[in-house]
Image: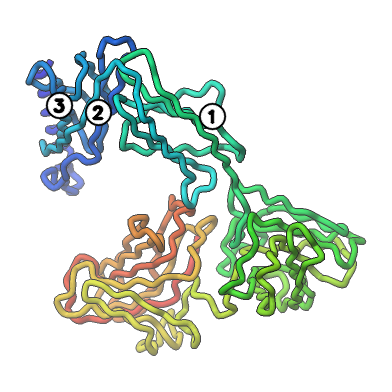
Amino acid sequence: MKKLHFIISLFVLAMAIGCSNDSSGSDVDIDSVGAPVNISALTTIAQDNSGKVTFLPKGEGVTQYEIYFGHGATQPVIVNPGATTTHTYPEGIYQAKIVAMGINGKKTEITQTLTVSFLAPTNLQVTLAHVVGDNLSASVSAKANFETFFQVYFGEDPNEIPVDFMEGETIKHTYANVGTYEVKVVALSGGVATTTHTESITISNPILLPVDFESATLNYAFNNFGGALTAVANNPSVDASNVSAKVAKLTKTAGAEVWAGSFLELGEPIDFSTLKKIRIKAWSPKAGIVVKMKLENLTDSNINTEVDVTNTVANNWEELTFDFSAVDNANKYQRVVLFFDFGNAGTGADYYYDDIQLSSGAESLVLPLTFESATLSYAYGNFGGATTAVITNPEKSGINTSSTVSALTKGNGSEVWAGSSLALDTPINFSTFKKLKMKVWSPQAGIIVKFKLENLTDSSINKEIDATTTVADGWEELTFDFAGIVNANNYQRIVIFCDFGNSGTGKTYYFDDIKQSN
């Protein structure tokens, strides 16, 4: 059997090498492929005092596994990815070794402690927690004495099949609905007796600022009054000023009261300790109407405050800012009430709003970026020997006659990956527009311009796209297609690399007008 598996592995390796030298000319360097990673083994034991343990090895980039049981025969058992193998142990603690081999023969090995006991596990300790940033998910980990493995039931399905896991692993589960669930963790050894821990967890999914109406799991439970009707709807005017797919639609029905409106209840009071203003995007069929925002205490509507703003744009999106600088934060305002065309009876007109968020009232650093603002601070983060700053456009010609642009200088001897980053005030919304466009001026054609997006708090969450210039000493517009991007990753930092892959020679590259597009 060992020889057969060895022959199969050589066959796979030969196939990969053969495929790497096809007629396309795109050679794949097999030797450059790294060794397998994330190697482990799920070990489960029969509960019949037999000591029979099943191994399910796991890993990435693996063509075959060698399992050394740490008991009995010294020769390993060969296991293919996805397959299992078994071994019978007497009671004791063993050091099993898992060796994973990749397509080029590189190996990674780990040693895993295995406890075989016929006694019931003791000292079971379970950690059940909410997942930060994911209201509908919970995580479980556990440890115990004399256990071989654990099973967890998350309590959502009466016919639930438990999830097996090992000590040191954390298991995540996402619930379909809010509610309180009883989570059960069972510690198993090789005997019939088990040890169980049960614990309740409450899953809630509150509406919190900022509100963008894009969530498929949140319940946007609008409360209507006076003849107004509000619901989540498709964006009636998707463009650069509002790229959202979903927005709130308020219909002020014919004959509705002059004070008709609707409100949303937030999951917690608005925190005005630092930011004192609330900004929304609004769309109206006419300009010059009064848009009123009222804030109320959740339990006593007599505790309230309101601000009026008059819109200036018809049939398009604009940002409206409501100044609550005098607000008393101790009043715990938790209900957001909106009125459109306040003071006039309803005519059946539709009004839309979106992106309710706290604001300083200052201009926001968001897409599209034109670099023309006199008040924004374009605080670039530079790395690898590159420096970037906003300067006067040195080449007002062709497709770009704007006054100011960003200039990236790749210093002499700078790294091949030298570049600059810029953090936006809010994540880019990719719900409708999946492409980014940027105007670029380069002293040479044929260079790679890399556009990278990163999560603001975790740069390992990122996505990058390359484009190649075709013009020297002139402006051109490059398109970066982020089709398939996960909007929930909240990409908020943009990173620009010019002439990626080559060391710096002191040349300067210019870019401008970064915007979303389809």
Up/down of 278 relative to 202, above or below = below
Label pair 1/2, CB-CB below 8 angstroms: no
Residue at horizontal 25 percent and vertical 40 percent from the top: 38
Where residue 510 sits in the image (x, y, percent)? Answer: 34, 79
**Rounded to the nearest whole Å, what is the CA distance between mark 2 and mark 3?**
9 Å
Q: State the residue position of label 2.
A: 57
Q: State the residue position of label 1.
A: 155
Where residue 119 sits in the image (x, y, percent)? Answer: 31, 17
Q: Say left or right for 177 vs 8.
A: right
Q: Say left or right for 89 vs 475.
A: left
Q: Which circle's residue, 3 or 1, is located before the other in the chain?
A: 3
Q: Residue 243 carries which label?
A: none
Mark 1 is surrounded, within 10 Å at the Cα level, by few (under 14), some (14 to 19) or many (20 or more) other residues, namely some
Q: For numbered disc 1, what is the local secondary structure?
A: loop
The front one of 336 and 468 is 336
Q: State the residue position of label 3.
A: 66
Q: Which circle's residue, 2 or 3, is located before the other in the chain?
A: 2
Where residue 90 sits in the image (x, y, percent)? Answer: 19, 14
Number of callouts in the render?
A: 3
- Asked which quadrant contains residue 149, the reply is top left
Residue at horizontal 43 percent and vertical 50 percent from the top: 484
Q: Disc 1 or disc 2, which is closer to the eye?
A: 1
Q: For numbered disc 3, what is the local secondary structure?
A: strand
Mark 3 is surrounded, within 10 Å at the Cα level, by few (under 14), some (14 to 19) or many (20 or more) other residues, namely some
Q: Which circle's residue, 1 or 2, is located before the other in the chain?
A: 2
**Rounded to the nearest whole Å, what is the CA distance between mark 1 and mark 2?**
28 Å
Q: Identify which amino acid the numbered label 2 is placed on.
A: Pro
**Rounded to the nearest whole Å, what is the CA distance between mark 3 and mark 1?**
37 Å
